[in-house]
Image (cartoon, grey):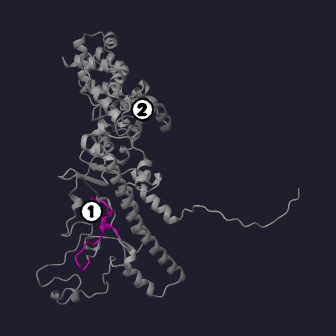
Amino acid sequence: MAINAKLELRQTQSLVMTPQLQQAIKLLQLSNMELSTFVEGELERNPLLERAEGDDLVSPPADGSAAEKPLDENSSAADADDTDSFVDLESGGDNSRTDDLDADPRDMFPDLGDFVPGAVLDSGWSGLTPSAGGGSEDGTDLEAYVAEEKTLRAYLAEQLVLAFADPAQRMIGQHIIDLTDEAGYMPGDLAALADQLSAPIDLVEDTLREMQKFEPCGVFARDLRECLALQLNEQNRCDPAMAALLDHLHLLAAHDLVALKRATGVTDEDLADMVAELKRLNPKPGLEFGAMPAQPVVPDVLLRTLPDGSYHVELNSDTLPRVLVNQTYYARVSKSPLAKQDKSYLVDCLQSANWLVKSLDQRARTILKVAQEIIRQQDAFFTFGVRHLRPLNLKTVADAISMHESTVSRVTANKYMATNRGLFELKYFFTSAIAATGEGDLHSSEAVRHRISEMIDAESADDVLSDDKIVERLRADGIDIARRTVAKYREALGIPSSVQRRRQKRMELATSI
């Protein structure tokens, strides 16, 4: 077979991901906080982008008509106010900023008289100069009055200086503080610490033993047993029976009362008192200092019920970035003589700014469209509750709104909806289906999990439901489900087995007497 070189011409089709398309896809799956961070970065990088504030959002038309049409003309749920954050760059730039930067203040405010920057006006108003420290307009630095939040390590370091005069012990103590986690535990190895500092192990142990007397009580413990023992020793309550209970915390976690009584050698009444005393202790004493506050979830979509029973859905305007393209600045700079490289940079900035605004507009419209379809599919949930949640997949919503499944998946990621039933992630409404025993409708897996949770919450100490009994009750309600599926759902809900629940209820009953 002869090998020779030749030229061939082939025609193929391929999907090319342009940088603009990649950016649009990236924006679609970002949460509102991630989107805000991204837009802030673009505002710093692109000189043609600026934050829209107040009247800069939309210029109202002269005929008094609406500034923008609703996001979805076929639905009254869209609110014109939600589109104020977006700019139609193909309309000639009417919505762009048109401030005349060279205007004389005397022409805009003739009553001011002769304008002198920083001068005191004749009307009695004096020029207000912000403080150098970034304070308020009256010159007061508000940050100077904010109380400093004391952290756990700072609080321990203060006690370290007072507890030890020996520089070696202070150095060892500071290393121990650095190893301590936010809960107050010291998970490090003392032998490794002694080897690192080239210090005697006895000196390290003595330093730690003294530091375990610091406040808050229980700090510098290496496990839960030691943390509880330190607090009990402080209260002079660590007797042999309590020490035996601390040595068998695994039995307490399993709610095995019989084994606990045998290990501690006490009566039921004494054991109940000891368990109640342990519950009053703090297993994580370090969290009293400098605990990070939980970041609240801000909804992207707002749903409210109208008096006629219908639903009104709108985007949360607080989560929508408000940006404008400064066409005036672009026109002024482009008219000036520029080098080829500067012109290319300016054109790239303009294209990037235009595409960003359009991408934000498209992102908002897509989120609203997906949310509207979810509400239409799950209307029974919003009316009657979790029991009436229907099985739903991405393909059903994608086909209804003529989009791809991957687009719907990106839209529902890290997006939340505030409803009359609470705050839910959009992915919550997509659940798998469980077959019915007869010819009835399919059941949502989330609705079945809710039923299992309700059954277990309603059970008593004398009638604890096993997984088999739960299966029987669900099948009586028309749900065809296997025992292993019930066990899987129960474990996903964090619910222990029937044996552990029976022990737990008996212990709660014994400690309450």
Q: Is residue 83 magenta?
A: yes
* Disc 2, SS: helix
Please provide percent x and percent y for residue 379: 29, 46
For this orientation, the residue located farthest to the front is 439
| CA neighbours of label 1 inside 10 A, class few (<14), some (14 to 19), many (20+) | some
Please provide percent x and percent y for residue 286: 31, 37
Residue of label 2? 204
Label disc, if present, on residue 79 of the rendered structure: 1
* Disc 1, SS: loop
At x 29%, y 73%, the residue is 58
Range shown magenta: 61-86
**At label 2, which amino acid type do we have?**
Val
**At label 1, which amino acid type do we have?**
Asp
At x 42%, y 32%, the residue is 204
Q: Earlier in the sequence, mark 2 or mark 1?
A: 1
Label disc, if present, on residue 15 of the rendered structure: none
Is residue 278 shown above or below 40? above
Please provide percent x and percent y for residue 253: 34, 22
Q: Is residue 132 magenta?
A: no
